[in-house]
Amino acid sequence: MLRAKPLLNLMGDRLHTLPLIVLYLTDGCNSQCVTCDIWRNPRRNMSLALVDTLVDACQELQVRWLLLSGGEAMQHPHWPEIAQRFRESGVYVMLLTNGLLLRKQADAVIASVDEVIVSLDAGTAETYHAIRGVNAFDLVLDGIRAVRAGGLPVVTRTTVQRGNYQEIPQIIASAKAADVTRISFLTVDVSNTFAFGPRFTADASLPVMTPADHSPLMTALTPNDVRELAHVLDTVEARFADDFASGLIAESPPKMRRMVDYFAAINRESDFPRPRCNAPHINVVVEVDGTLRPCYFLPAFGQLHPQPSENGQAVSLKEAVNTDAAQALRQAYRSGARPECERCVCPLYKGPRSLLRM
């Protein structure tokens, strides 16, 4: 029964297990990306009391994977200790990072996590600086090499947008030269208002971008760009055929082509390719203050209270993910009532066989 327990999640809208937890350890960041405004806000760090509550829930909810995220997770002063606590509970810990601190903290990374996922949004130093707002392309690649030298698997994740789509071949070549384990791509999100904190809010006191540049559509591809992206992918499929076949490039050529369909839909030239996803039934996102989301792209459904509040008792993770609001949100996405899901850029799906292999 224990082995089959994760399957119960797929039979209704109540969670019996929680295969994946995503933790926003901090909402501060040391990048200044054009696609995200989180770096503009004062930094808050997740409390260790909240971490304790989550660690204590791992066995009951059969948590299998943990993704440390943010902001920049490595800016939390206790992130290695937090990672090690989850690993001691039998959880596979992944660190999602912009890579700026990888070289400096390589020893802590190697000792504390099972896998590293590094954002690599360019194939040249110039483009990296333009997109990420910091001059750190070589620093990030050096950090990847340092972690790989310690034996850790490293995945690069590239958010494809107007500023970097022509560099997809260079991005693959740079990642291969740094000896990464896997190379992955997804399209930039330019439509969701819930994902990744407040974005695209003009602030005249911060001379980073002009109001025109600050539009989210600056990152989307134009119709001409979409056609050029198709040609770029022709080159990629031919040049890196062996890397697709070996799985070094995580997405198959047909899945890469879905990026063309997505940007064409942004330009109203086609329908959005509806992704296959059951993320709200297998994962939860925990924000720095305990706010809970079913995934990156859907609104919050509740709050985790590790200690008794003024208005009530402490709320456990299992209770928090199974409130009426949480179950209603899962039912809504499953029935097609959430428009955000039609244009999701980062779907997550695990079927019965995958859950049984956990």
Image (cartoon, rainbow, N blue to C red):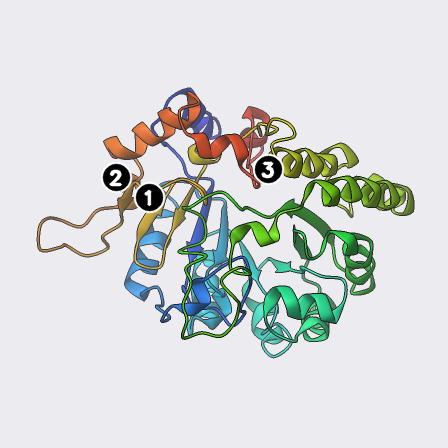
Please give the name of the residue rendered at 46% of the width and 58% of the height, measured from the top-left corner: 88
Q: Nearer the viewer, residue 85 or 137?
A: 137
Q: What amino acid is labelled 2 in the image?
A: Glu
Q: What amino acid is labelled 3 in the image?
A: Ile
Disc 2 element: helix
Q: Quadrant of the C terminus?
A: top right
Q: Please identify the residue farthest to the left as the structure is shown.
A: 311
Spatial distance from mark 3 to mark 1, Cα to Cα? 25 Å
Q: Upstream in the sequence, badge 3 or badge 2?
A: 3
Q: Please identify the residue farthest to the bottom as the structure is shown.
A: 104
Answer left or right for 340 relative to 269.
left
Answer left or right for 188 relative to 36.
right
Q: Which mark is residue 160?
A: none
Q: Nearer the viewer, residue 102 or 306?
A: 102
Spatial distance from mark 1 to mark 2, Cα to Cα? 15 Å
Q: Position of residue 113 (x, y in %)?
A: 56, 61
Q: Position of residue 217 (x, y in %)?
A: 56, 49
Q: Which residue is mark 2?
A: 319
Q: Which residue is mark 3?
A: 266
Q: Position of residue 66 (x, y in %)?
A: 49, 51
Report whether residue 1 is seen. Answer: no
Q: Which residue is mark 1?
A: 300
Badges 3 and 2: C-beta atoms under 8 Å apart? no
Please give the name of the residue rendered at 55% of the width and 37% of the height, measured from the top-left corner: 348
Please give the name of the residue rendered at 13% of the width and 55% of the height, measured from the top-left corner: 309
